[in-house]
Image: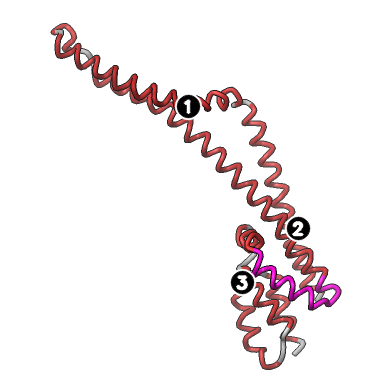
Amino acid sequence: MKEVLDEIDRRIKRLEAEIELAELSMRRMERSLKGEEVLRKAGSYSLYYLLFAVVWMVAGLLFLIGIRNRLPVAANLPVLRYGLFFILIFLAPVAYILWTNRGERATEGIESRERWARMVIRLFYTPLKEALERGDEVKLVELADSLLENRELARAIEGVNEGDSKMMAYALYLYIRRSPELKGEIVETSEKLANKPLKKLLLLGVKDL
């Protein structure tokens, strides 16, 4: 059992390191975003600016085309050059909006992984370790049930790459009901499991049969 508990500790430490890394990344992003506060405030008017840019671009091009057709002197006006200039003016707010949204999506992704890691430690690995240390199979059943019923926990486990929650629940049920008749199923399930602590737990259960 010590080998299983040691593996649980390793997984907890890995998740804690991921939490620390996420917190560090968030602090860095917050510092960089402070320098863009003025731009963020101006961003609330980005849609109006975008609409204004489109209208201005179209009106300017029509004006240049009209002058070119009516005045011989303006026949050589570089309409294409001015058109490219207007397009650049149009793309500026679009690029800003995309950049802002990209930063927000990155922040949300980091926050999600941090939240998932904390949830997996609190709702899965910590109770799993405590139940195995006490030999409390009732708690193991409750933990297996929560893997199937708690969608947020299932999503968190998969989000931090700790395995498939349904397979993990099945592994716990097999361990609890282990018997010589189920030895083949236990071995086969352990080979499919991505979660290392439960894989070791199943193999340990096979040795006891």
Left or right: residue 143 compared with residue 88: right
Marks 3/1 in contact by CB < 8 Å: the verdict is no
Q: Is the magenta stretch mostly helix, strand or loop?
A: helix
- The kind of residue tagged 1 is Ser
Q: Residues under labels 3 and 1: Cα distance?
A: 46 Å
Left or right: residue 4 compared with residue 101: right
- The kind of residue tagged 2 is Lys
**Visual colour scheme:** secondary structure
Q: Quadrant of the C terminus?
A: bottom right
- Give coordinates of residue 46: x percent, y percent: 47, 26
Q: Residue 136 carries which label?
A: none
Q: Which residue is pictured at 43% across the width and 31% down the height? A: 94
Indicate which label's residue lies in the foreground, 1 or 2: 1
Judging by the rendered image, the residue that carries numbered circle 2 is 13
Of all residues, the one furthest to the top in this rendering is: 73
Bin the neighbour count of mark 2 within 10 Å (Cα to Cα): few under 14, some 14-19, many 20 and up: few
Q: Which comes sooner in the sequence, label 1 or label 2?
A: 2
Above or below for 144 versus 162: below
Q: Is mark 3 on a helix, strand or loop?
A: helix
Q: Which comes sooner in the sequence, label 3 or label 2?
A: 2
Q: Residues under labels 3 and 2: Cα distance?
A: 23 Å
Q: Which residue is pictured at 16% across the width and 12% down the height? A: 75
> Which residues are the magenta region?
131-150
Q: Residue 166 carries which label?
A: 3
Q: Which comes sooner in the sequence, label 3 or label 1?
A: 1
Q: Which residue is pictured at 74% across the width and 76% down the height? A: 141
Judging by the rendered image, the residue that carries numbered circle 1 is 46
- Between 137 and 209, the one lying in front of the other is 137
Q: Which residue is pictured at 81% across the width and 74% down the height? A: 132
Q: Residues under labels 1 and 2: Cα distance?
A: 44 Å
